[in-house]
Image (cartoon, grey):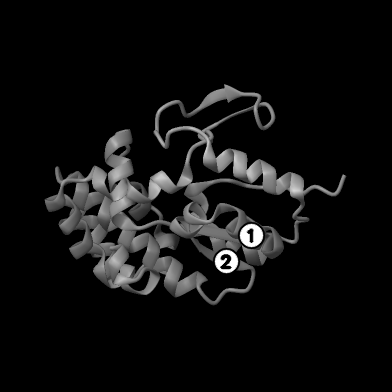
Amino acid sequence: RGRRAMLDDPFALLSTRWLVERLGCRAVVLVRDPVSLVGSWQRLGWTADLSALLAQPLLARDLLSDDEVASLRSMIGSPDEVARIATLWRVAYGVVQQCFADLPGVRIQPYEDLAAAPALGFAELYDFCGLRWSSRVADTVRAATTGGTGSDEGSHRWSLRFGLSKTAFRPMDSRTMLTAASRLPEADANQVRELTADSAADLYPAIRV
């Protein structure tokens, strides 16, 4: 039917090279400003088990430097949740820059660019993935990114609007998500900026972080 399978899996980030080289996938790595990401995680109550990453010796050997391993190990059991999430961001995005930035078949896509101009951004992604962009697709993208309130509430509910699904997706005004950094107190935001400065400098202009 001319359709392509899509694997939407944030936990597959560190498997990107394997997926591209072994399975022939075209990978879109969605990156997000660290302050906004930490703010979202805090609001949703998400956390990360850093010890689970370090329990994978091949991961540590092939993708992480000694300094990155030490950074993750220092955060295990830390009560500073902001620092833990920021450290995970720095290590994960360090892998993106060092291992995937020049890998054929991988596109590193800033979340903020898609949120600011969804139709243009998704048209470019369709081209990268070898998919056919049409007026119907454009209308669907516009409907999905201009409706709703931008709230994180209401995810993982059944929906028929864009086809029967139960995912984290829900229509929202994507541009409102560009202000998500304000979810963090300024002291926490400054802490995130300090902890992620090296990695963020290459992925984002200073004004964004």
1 or 2: mark nearer the eye: 1
Report the front residue among 67 and 195: 195
Furthest residue to the left? Answer: 187
What label does residue 107 carry, if any? 2
What label does residue 108 carry, if any? none
Q: Which residue is mark 1?
A: 125
Residue shown at the point (54%, 43%) measured from the top left: 145
Residue 127 seen by the camera: yes
State how far apart marks 1 and 2 are (Cα): 9 Å
Q: Is residue 106 left or right of residue 206?
A: right
Task: Give the image location of residue 197, x and y in percent.
Answer: 25, 68
* Figure quadrant of residue 81: top left
For the C terminus, give its image quadrant.
bottom left
Q: Is residue 205 left or right of residue 59?
A: left
The type of residue carrying mark 2 is Arg
Report the front residue among 163 and 24: 163
Residue shown at the point (56%, 53%) measured from the top left: 118
The type of residue carrying mark 1 is Leu
Answer above or below: position of 101 versus 79: below
Task: Give the image location of residue 2, x and y in percent.
Answer: 85, 49
For the N terminus, give its image quadrant.
top right
Answer above or below: position of 101 versus 195: below
Residue shown at the point (61%, 39%) measured from the top left: 143
Task: Give the image location of residue 133, x and y in percent.
Answer: 75, 55
In terms of sequence position, does the residue under pointer 1 or pointer 2 come before the other? 2
Badges 1 and 2: C-beta atoms under 8 Å apart?
yes
Q: Is residue 77 left or right of residue 163?
A: left
Task: Give the image location of residue 156, x and y in percent.
Answer: 50, 27
Furthest residue to the bottom? Answer: 102
* Figure quadrant of residue 120: bottom right
Q: Secondary structure at mark 1?
A: helix
Q: Secondary structure at mark 2?
A: strand
